[in-house]
Image (spheres, grey):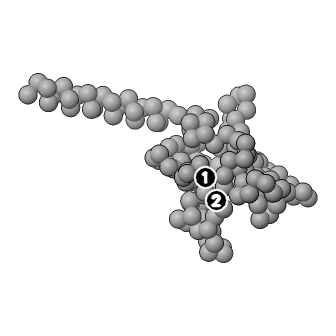
Amino acid sequence: MRGAIKSRMLVALVAAITAGTAQAQSPRDVIEDARLVGIWQEDCRQPASPRNVRSIYAVDRSGAATLTYDSGAGSQLWVIRILSARRLGPDRIAYLSEAVTTKQQLDITLMLTGGRIRIWTSRQVPQGKLQVENGIVTSNRQPSPLQIRCS
């Protein structure tokens, strides 16, 4: 009987510690723990373009996490601040992002699989309009880009 009680107490303690750690993670912690910092693209051998957008996840010295989209020569960089982030499981993270220039916020779920990333859901905040649902871009019904780490 004592062994069963100790086991339950240990499980409860581990769950409490794990829950506290998950809630305390900063966007920097989540982005770094998920190994997202770096350059991602569908085809790293090709230059950035509207059909081969380069995604650059970074963390600056102050600890701020950002995502920059580069659509190639002649296109303006789209810089996004990651305001909050959390792990949803071993293959997904969620983050709230805000475009630096427009202040448009998106609630994003990113799928991490086999060394690749894909936006699984993207929802405008506060409107709630889905841009990506279950890995499919709602405007054209095509899969969202599956990117691989370039560096």
Looking at the rendering, in which quadrant would you find the N terminus? top left
Task: Tell me the quarter of the picture where residue 82 sits.
Answer: top right
Q: Is residue 68 left or right of residue 122?
A: right
Height in image: 6 above or below 85?
Answer: above
Residue 135 position within the rendered picture, expressed as x and y whole percent measured from the top left:
57, 64
Q: Which residue is mark 2?
A: 146
Task: Tell me the quarter of the picture where residue 16 sits.
Answer: top left
Please indicate, yes or no, whether residue 151 appears anywhere in the rendered image: yes
Disc 2 and disc 1: Cα gap in Å? 6 Å
Residue 21 position within the rendered picture, expressed as x and y whole percent measured from the top left:
45, 31
Number of other residues with Cα within 10 Å of mark 1, as a class: few under 14, some 14 to 19, many 20 or more: some
Residue type marked 2:
Leu
Number of other residues with Cα within 10 Å of mark 2, as a class: few under 14, some 14 to 19, many 20 or more: some
Residue at the image position 59 percent from the left and 68 percent from the top = 136
* Numbered disc 2: secondary structure: loop
Lower position in the chain sequence, tag 2 or tag 1:
1
Residue type marked 1:
Arg
Q: Please report contact status of discs 2 and 1: CB closer than 8 Å, yes or no.
A: yes
Residue 33 position within the rendered picture, expressed as x and y whole percent measured from the top left:
56, 36
Please indicate, yes or no, whether residue 99 appears anywhere in the rendered image: no
- Single out the residue that lies furthest toward the right: 74
Residue at the image position 61 percent from the left and 68 percent from the top = 143
Q: Which residue is mark 1?
A: 116
Residue at the image position 77 percent from the left and 65 percent from the top = 51
Residue at the image position 14 percent from the left and 26 percent from the top = 3
For the residue pair 46 and 97, the one nearer the viewer reads as 46
Looking at the rendering, in which quadrant would you find the C terminus? top right
* Numbered disc 1: secondary structure: strand
Residue 66 position within the rendered picture, expressed as x and y whole percent measured from the top left:
70, 42
